[in-house]
Image (tube, rainbow, N blue to C red):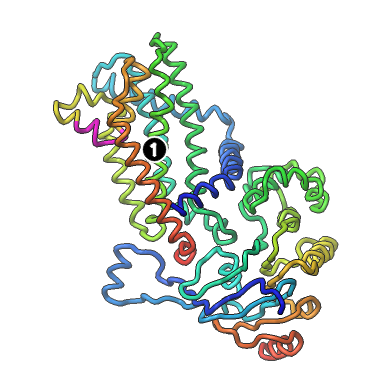
């Protein structure tokens, strides 16, 4: 419990820095490009167009309001994928900072979550615009957005802390993560509907045991299909997310001052 | 009895030469090839009184910087402990966390907040920082356009306003051109000579150490070779390097 107390104190202490640093990172990212921040909108739109081309034209598959459908998948996936990928080598990449001053290392994950969280929010705003274009009704179910995003956030944060810790010591984790993420990508129903394309009961299993496909599906339920999310499964994954976070924070607390010895 | 500010007790620390794990490295470790730890600190113990200025000398790679990092709490010792008696501490490091694409002005906030200052504190001191840095209109330009001298001026100006009980200095006594060097050295001296502050300073500049230190620690190959009188030890150290 003491460690969690220290964690909360550190978050309070470094929140200002994390936000400022995330803003700086976002600003620096587009500082020299011609299209500037428009890339944050353009990139997911281009990805969406690619999937529409592949799924609707090449595979001749039909899904109602497919652009909105696939955009939700891409938004969730991009957030999760970029968070995990950047965490594996986070300590190594921030070597210049962490060898000179003490900074609780989960602050680095927090900073990343602000950067990619901001991009995800831009993407979610685009979903609302797409909904207007495709005449999908805005319903009261949209209020579930906060709880589903909180679930995605806490799951990803916990996993990233654990991956950052082990990634510091195990070089091969980067390759393992890349393969794991590729696998997860195809089994998360980003550009297809798990419920209709995979046979019963496997579709139900996949939508329950894969948190990413579950989260994407619930976002689609509230944005497109006016359905209440599965609160029980959400709660179970939320608890798992909290457990991941606690494990990650404890690992970092215990070993963070040894990271420099290996980077 | 004088109040102690830092107590270093039997600190041992090793870096892993064969850094992280990978299949190749695990295979090598089975064959017991090349796997060894480099012991950088081999049982260092000393204490520093409040308000004391202690110089640390030693040849390159003897463990001086690692010792400062250990005292600053950036890295933890394998064995032994460092007791700061509840004092706040900072290791003066130049340009930590600078973002090349941001302006000098924005980097003052970024680096300052990383060093533990709040936005409000920086806002209160920002005019002083800019004035001291002599960057004038360049403060609104991205740091990537700065010369290395300008960069150090900005970095120094940010670090010089830090207010902690213990200050650790690793070779950054003065930076920039001749004029700024004198100014930054004077500022550093003002910071160091403040009697409420405890200072540990690593430097190769024997004359400077003679001028400002109360005591000197000579580190050789991870051990304390000598500790005590400034002039005696520094002369001996100088002669050993001839």
User: Which residue in the rendered view is the most extreme toward the left?
Assistant: A200
- Pick the front one: B204 or B190: B190
- Residue A1: % across, % down: 43, 52
- Pick the front one: A190 or B190: B190
Q: Is residue A210 magenta?
A: yes
Q: Is residue B194 magenta?
A: no
Q: Main secondary structure of the magenta part?
A: helix
- Pick the front one: A183 or B48: B48
- In the image: residue A30, left or right of residue A65: right
- Pick the front one: A113 or B204: A113
The residue that mark 1 highlights is A80
| Residue appearing at x 51%, y 46% in the figure | A8
- In the image: residue B116, left or right of residue A256: right
In this orientation, does residue B149 appear?
no
- Disc 1 is placed on an element classified as helix
Vertical side of B113 occupied by B70: above or below: below
- Residue B45: % across, % down: 57, 80
- In the image: residue B186, left or right of residue B206: right
Looking at the image, how many numbered discs can be counted on the residues? 1
Magenta residues, as a range?
A: A205-212
Vertical side of A200 occupied by B2: above or below: below
| Residue appearing at x 31%, y 17% in the figure | A227
Vertical side of B6 occupied by A110: above or below: above
């Amino acid at each position: 419990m003491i460690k969690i107390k220290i964690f909360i104190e550190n978050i309070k202490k470094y929140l200002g820095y994390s936000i400022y640093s995330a803003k700086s990172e976002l600003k620096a990212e587009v500082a020299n490009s011609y299209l500037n921040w428009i890339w944050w909108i353009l990139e997911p739109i281009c990805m969406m167009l690619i999937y529409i081309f592949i799924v609707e034209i090449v595979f001749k598959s039909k899904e109602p309001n497919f652009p909105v459908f696939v955009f939700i998948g891409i938004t969730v996936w991009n957030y999760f994928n970029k968070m995990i990928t950047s965490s594996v080598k986070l300590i190594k990449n921030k070597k210049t900072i962490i060898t000179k001053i003490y900074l609780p290392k989960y602050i680095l994950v927090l900073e990343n979550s602000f950067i990619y969280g901001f991009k995800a929010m831009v993407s979610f705003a685009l979903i609302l615009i797409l909904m207007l274009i495709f005449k999908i009704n805005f319903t009261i179910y949209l209020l579930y957005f906060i709880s589903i995003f909180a679930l995605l956030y806490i799951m990803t944060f916990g996993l990233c802390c654990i991956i950052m810790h082990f990634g510091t010591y195990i070089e091969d984790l980067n390759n393992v993560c890349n393969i794991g993420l590729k696998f997860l990508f195809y089994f998360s129903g980003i550009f297809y509907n798990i419920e209709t394309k995979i046979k019963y009961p496997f579709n139900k299993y996949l939508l329950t045991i894969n948190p990413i496909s579950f989260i994407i599906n619930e976002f689609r339920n509230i944005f497109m299909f006016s359905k209440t999310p599965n609160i029980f499964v959400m709660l179970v994954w939320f608890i798992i997310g909290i457990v991941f976070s606690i494990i990650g924070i404890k690992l970092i607390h215990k070993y963070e001052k040894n990271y420099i010895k290996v980077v | 009895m004088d109040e102690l500010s830092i107590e270093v007790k039997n600190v041992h620390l090793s870096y892993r030469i064969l850094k992280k794990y990978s299949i190749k490295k695990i295979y090598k470790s089975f064959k017991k090839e090349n796997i060894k730890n480099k012991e950088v600190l081999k049982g260092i113990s000393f204490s520093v009184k409040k308000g004391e200025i202690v110089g640390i000398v030693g040849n390159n790679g003897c463990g001086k910087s690692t010792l400062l990092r250990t005292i600053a709490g950036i890295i933890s010792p394998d064995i032994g402990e460092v007791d700061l008696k509840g004092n706040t501490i900072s290791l003066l490091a130049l340009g930590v966390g600078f973002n090349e694409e941001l302006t000098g002005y924005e980097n003052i906030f970024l680096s300052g907040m990383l060093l533990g200052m709040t936005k409000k504190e920086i806002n209160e001191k920002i005019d002083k920082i800019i004035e001291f840095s002599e960057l004038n209109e360049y403060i609104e330009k991205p740091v990537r356009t700065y010369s290395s001298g300008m960069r150090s001026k900005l970095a120094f100006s940010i670090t010089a306003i830090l207010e902690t009980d213990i200050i650790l200095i690793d070779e950054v006594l003065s930076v920039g051109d001749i004029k700024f060097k004198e100014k930054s050295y004077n500022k550093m001296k003002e910071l160091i000579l403040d009697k409420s502050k405890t200072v540990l300073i690593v430097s190769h500049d024997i004359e400077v150490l003679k001028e400002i230190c109360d005591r000197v620690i000579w580190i050789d190959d991870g051990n304390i070779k000598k500790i005590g009188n400034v002039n005696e030890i520094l002369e001996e150290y100088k002669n050993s390097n001839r």
